[in-house]
Image: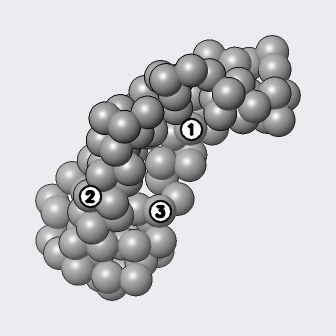
Amino acid sequence: MILKKDSLTLGLILGIFAPFLGLFLLKIYKFGVFTFKETLQYIIVEPGYKTLSVGLSVSLLLNALLFTIYINTGKDYTAKGIFITTLVYGLVVLSIKTFF
């Protein structure tokens, strides 16, 4: 099972894809009637990128959940990979909020 592995690579992979799942869930919740293409166009064209930065911030909560699960089960290398990707995503969100 995937939860029993302890690997930095697995943590990086999980940390990269969890925020995309969060954005997908945000799309379904907030933009349910629109297609993915229309939603993406709105997020990119919107002045200030508010929806994008909010979506990325909320989607990072999935990384926090995964990080907590792997820390509590003693899978430190996987948690380290998730933490690294969370920091990278966090810097992207911070730069979007600061510079755009």
Q: Tell me which residue sits at (30%, 52%) in the image.
A: 91
Please, what is the three-letter code of the amino acid marked with disc 1? Leu
* Callout 3: SS: helix
Q: Is residue 46 above or below residue 72?
A: above
What residue did someone put label 1 on? Answer: 23
Position in image of residue 2 (x %, y %): 45, 72
Q: CA distance from mark 1 to mark 3?
A: 12 Å
Please, what is the three-letter code of the amino acid marked with disc 3? Ile
Disc nearer the start of the sequence (1/3)? 3
In front: mark 2 or mark 1?
A: 2
What residue did someone put label 3 on? Answer: 16
Q: Is residue 51 above or below residue 13?
A: above
Disc nearer the start of the sequence (3/2)? 3
Q: CA distance from mark 3 to mark 2?
A: 11 Å
Position in image of residue 69 (x %, y %): 25, 55
| Residue closest to the eye, 19 or 52 | 52
In front: mark 3 or mark 2?
A: 2
| Residue 57 in view | no
| Residue closest to the eye, 55 or 70 | 55
| Residue closest to the eye, 74 or 25 | 25
What residue did someone put label 2 on? Answer: 87
Disc nearer the start of the sequence (2/1)? 1
